[in-house]
Image: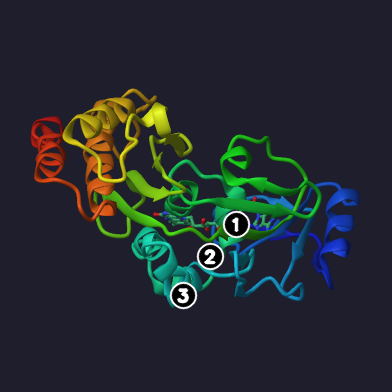
Amino acid sequence: MLKFQRFVRAANIDDALEVLRFRKGAQVMGGGMWMRLSKRTVPCVIDLSDCGLDAIEETADEFRIGAYVTLRQLECDAALNAATGNVLTAAVHDIVGVQFRQLATVGGSVFGRFGFSDVLCALLALDAEVELAEAGRVPLATFVDMPYELDILTHVIIKKHDYRAAYRCVRKAATDFPTINTCAAYWDNDWHLAVGARPAKARLLTGAELGVTSAEPTAGELAGAIEAVRGLAYSSNIWGSERYRRHLAGVLAARAIVAAAPYATQEARDAASAACAHEEAIR
Ligand SMILES: Cc1cc2nc3c(=O)[nH]c(=O)nc-3n(C[C@H](O)[C@H](O)[C@H](O)COP(=O)(O)OP(=O)(O)OC[C@H]3O[C@@H](n4cnc5c(N)ncnc54)[C@H](O)[C@@H]3O)c2cc1C
């Protein structure tokens, strides 16, 4: 069972940061849904409920998502999802169940940087940053690979663009952890493709590295993207073998790109279909 020796309900982020720095072993709690799985005693847990981090705010240039916004809020926010090709709804709607998503937070999901994370995969393909109390604003793609330091994630920021985006994921069973997840987004004249649950942390491929430059990719570009995605590192666990993941990642990447490019040619669509030719054999 998870136990807390001390519980601090911080009045503001400065107070929370001070407790985090000076109380040995102190830890911020989001929804506590992941933390509660461990059997240990946390010397001091910090609750940020009074810090005003539970809203999604829209400005002219960006969406500011507070760390205590729940996955359910993320799923249901009409303006945010309309602006980002509905990838956030698509990414979270199979995570456990509604009651769970009403408790799990965006802050805990992003700060945790879980390899399987659907949330992280979707956000990574967008123009997203995290705001940390100590380190300030950091691009999400940089944050993913940063070491776990004593800091508090206060917001996730999504900059506004004319996004075309799509999310594709495979689960062995509905609401299970994902076997592989991908998110493709076209913005700022470039494709951004995130591949997660490899099962290592999501990786982002863009531009020449991905091999797709046209807004409406050709069959050749799509074949290049499939090859680039399959060139990433994959490994095996109970949700899928390394070989199956590698194959599936190419299939889902192609499908996500074609779904995000509304005027994709028939040749490109055929190339996406051809990518899954051996899916049954590999499963
Ligand atoms: C059974 C189960 C199934 C799941 N399935 C999926 C799935 O299929 N797909 C998916 O994407 N996710 C899945 N998740 C993960 C889930 O969606 C959340 O990402 C996870 O529960 C963390 O969110 P939380 O709010 O509960 O964080 P917590 O458990 O409270 O915290 C997680 C970690 O982040 C730290 N932390 C929390 N908030 C902050 C903050 N603001 N600043 C700094 N540090 C912070 C905590 O100290 C802790 O180390 C699953 C989780 C569980 C328990």
- Across and down, in percent, residue 70 comes to 54, 69
110 or 137, nearer to the observer:
137
Q: Is mark 1 within 8 Å of ligand 1?
A: yes
User: Mark 1 and 2 residues: CB-CB less than 8 Å, in contact?
Assistant: yes
**In which quadrant will I find the N terminus?**
bottom right
Q: Which residue is mark 2?
A: 104
User: Mark 1 and 3 residues: CB-CB less than 8 Å, in contact?
Assistant: no
- Across and down, in percent, residue 250 comes to 25, 34
Q: Which residue is mark 1?
A: 108
| Residue type indicated by callout 3 | Ala
Query: Tag 3 or tag 2, which sits nearer the N-term?
Result: 3
Q: Which residue is mark 3?
A: 79
Q: What color scheme is it?
A: rainbow
The residues tagged by marks 1 and 3 sit, at their Cα atoms, a distance apart of: 23 Å
Query: Tag 3 or tag 1, which sits nearer the N-term?
Result: 3
236 or 51, nearer to the observer:
51
- Across and down, in percent, residue 156 comes to 61, 58
Q: Is mark 2 within 8 Å of ligand 1?
A: yes
Crowd rating for badge 3 (residues with CA inside 10 Å; few <14, some 14–19, many 20+): few
- Across and down, in percent, residue 48 comes to 74, 68
Question: What residue lies at 22% left-to-right and 46% top-to-bottom?
Answer: 255
User: Mark 2 and 3 residues: CB-CB less than 8 Å, in contact?
Assistant: no
Crowd rating for badge 1 (residues with CA inside 10 Å; few <14, some 14–19, many 20+): many
83 or 55, nearer to the observer:
83
